[in-house]
Image: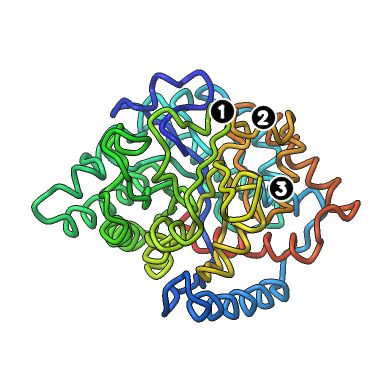
Amino acid sequence: MSISSRGPAASALITAGAAVAVLALAVCAATGSAPAAGAGTAAGRARPAAATAAADRSARTATLPQLDDWQLAGQHVIYSYPGLIPPSGLLNRICMGQVAGVIFFGANISSPAQIAGVIRQLNQADACPGNPVHEPLILETDQEGGLVRRLPGAPVLSEKQIGESSNPAAAASAAGTGAGDNLRSVGMNTNAAPVVDFYRQPGDFYDQYQRSYSMDPGTAGALGADFITAQQATGVAATAKHFPGLASATASQNTDVEPVTLYDHLDRIRALDEQPYRSAIAAGVKLVMLDWAVYPNIGSKRPAGLSTKVIKGELRNGLGFTGVTETDAIEAGALSPFGSTISSRSVQAAVAGDDLILSASQHVRDGAAAMAALVTAYRDGTLNQADFQASAARIIALRSSLPS
């Protein structure tokens, strides 16, 4: 996600005391490994493709719980809600097995004790006898560090401060441990961090908020991997974002607000922008979040999170990632040319290969609209049913790996 908020809490997002949570997904336990050869070479891209194909076959044969179509579709949706008290409609959907997880925003949190109480309530709903998925909900926030901290406390340093410290590797590991311990203390189990993208120019999209470790992609990837390894050792799933990379975005190119097109050459994207994701995948990251920029030189006119060439081509076949993918906020302004409704956007994202749809509008009805659209698309053949079931299996495997 970009630093800007979705909804009424916009001004709170870049303050250290704000408490926002974005739904991030995590991947199933078997994540892919980094290519042995460079991603731009035939050998470097063919070998992960074979591993991905094997993982897909395994996921297709995985045993799912007995789910009706609504429950199956619900496994693909992250919900959000307004205010400090979760609405009864959300609790009822959780109880019926129609919710994969919940994203929390600043308007949902008044204190660590308050949000811990809310999470206990959500977990109680998840334990309803009518819910066939007996796994923890995905409960997450943005806890990158520095300006982007949605709970008070660790990690205090921004990614840029970590990269400029005297011992960056130790500082990145400490930040990962601190983030994980902090989230676990209130019952959250997933973090939409770290940003693993490097930045190209001082003051650009990432650097203006100190959200990147380095201008060197190798350094950014190594420190991101240190954060991921340390955080996931606490039990909290990590998210590498925003694939395939926003390093070339200028300060004003914000996909939350408007369409963004990035014209980097394909060889440059694979050699530089994707490099930190190889490190994240090798570290076992449990989630990759797609961005909403368009990359014409990848061969697609669609935003990354709506592009099969990006999700299945670059991320899964190219880098061998076999875990859970997640969209950025489905309400983002960048998607305005690709449908005005949550329903249309959600189906396009699922068809492209996204596992989780992030509904971040703080309205339960929008998550429900996404689910209903997925049910219709599943029934009428717009969605490949085997692929959709395999995606649900990955999500449930992720949920089973999370602490409750």
Q: Give the colour scheme of this rendering.
A: rainbow
Element type at mark 1: loop
For disc 1, the neighbor class at 10 Å (few under 14, some 14 to 19, many from 20) is: some
Is 268 situated left or right of 55 in this image?
left
Residue 74, which numbered label? 3
Q: Quadrant of residue 116?
A: top left
Direction right: furthest residue: 380
Residue type beneath disc 3: Gly
Which residue is tagged 1?
258
Q: Which residue is mark 2?
A: 336
Verify CB contact (< 8 Å) between mark 2 and mark 1.
yes
| Residue density around tag 3, few if under 14, some if 14–19, many if 20 or more, within 10 Å | many
Category of crowding for the residue at label 2, using alpha-carbon neighbours closer than 10 angstroms: few (below 14), some (14–19), many (at least 20): some
Q: SS at mark 3?
A: helix
Looking at the image, residue 51 lies above or below residue 149 = below
Amino acid on which the number 1 mark rests in the picture: Glu
Answer with mark 3 or mark 2, whichever residue precedes in sequence.
3
Image position, residue 35 (x, y; %): 45, 75
Nearer to us in this view, 124 or 73: 73
Q: Residue 386, how many percent across, how many down?
A: 78, 66
Alpha carbon distance from label 2 to label 1 = 8 Å
Taking the spot 49% from the left edge, 54% from the top edge, the residue there is 265
